[in-house]
Amino acid sequence: MRVSVEPMDVEDIPQVLEVDRESYTLPWPASAYRREIIYNRNARYVVLRELTDDTHDGDAAAHEQRSRRSFFFRWPLRPDGAGGRPQGRVLGYAGMWLMVDEAHITTIAVRETWRGHGLGELLLVSLIENAMEMRAVRLTLEVRVSNDVAQRLYHKYGFERVGTRPRYYSDNNEDAYIMSTGDIRTAAYRLKLDELVGPLRERLRREGKSLVGGSEAEEPAGAGESTEFS
């Protein structure tokens, strides 16, 4: 199975809405995603795509050539019309906003049947990489106080509780923890991230997922409120 983390496109919105409805009690409307993608220059939204079997080698090569190097993965640029973009099912998505020097994660969601396979963690790492590219100083997010699984993952990547937003979630008036990293520009944080990516790659490899566009693409590789991933 081949997967790719790519910038979210308008054509992805119908599938993103499917994931949204599986993940949240109050999903966003299509117009909100369209507005974020087209008009919000400070927003970054990505999708995790399962590439289809009919993606030809030539298309994959063109897809790779349109990539730009990130810290651990390659993020495809928007297609220039040559070769088209590989199509496939959207398994998850994530997004964040850059506010001055702070990257605020707004959402991470994975299809229900694909949770527990490291895909949410892959999306989180992709956002952290993108925040570094945007020269953010730190990342922040809100998470339900009851979502222990997501909190453990965030803590693993350097997020700590810095506050609480009472009755933050309108569906049940649940409180939210505010979590934030330290300075992600430091050598210590980059080393920590590097050390975490190796085990993540190994986990994906064991799960039988090949990350197309990554620096090891040829190997078989296995925020708001986050979904229940591990």
Image (cartoon, rainbow, N blue to C red):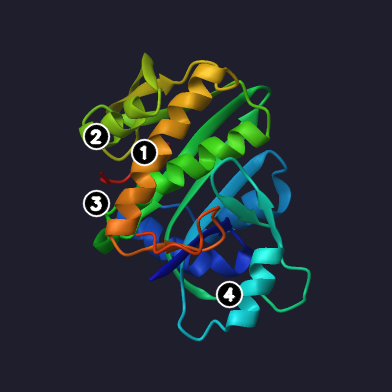
x and y, in percent, of residue 125 in the image? 46, 40
Residue of label 1: 225
Neighbour tally class for label 4: few under 14, some 14-19, many 20 plus, Cα within 10 Å: some
Give the side of residue 74 with respect to residue 161, left or right.
Answer: right
Neighbour tally class for label 3: few under 14, some 14-19, many 20 plus, Cα within 10 Å: few
Can you say which quadrant of the picture contains the N terminus? bottom left
Residue of label 2: 147
Determine contact: label 1, label 3, CB under 8 Å: no
> Which label sits on residue 86?
4
Neighbour tally class for label 2: few under 14, some 14-19, many 20 plus, Cα within 10 Å: some
Q: How far apart are marks 2 and 4 (CA)?
A: 34 Å
Q: What residue type is labelled 2?
A: Asn
- Mark 1, secondary structure of its residue: loop
Among the two numbered marks 4 and 3 on one chain, the one whose residue lies closer to the N terminus: 4
x and y, in percent, of residue 77 in the image? 70, 58
Among the two numbered marks 1 and 3 on one chain, the one whose residue lies closer to the N terminus: 3
Among the two numbered marks 2 and 4 on one chain, the one whose residue lies closer to the N terminus: 4
Q: How far apart are marks 2 and 3 (CA)?
A: 14 Å
Residue at point 44% right, 25% down? 192
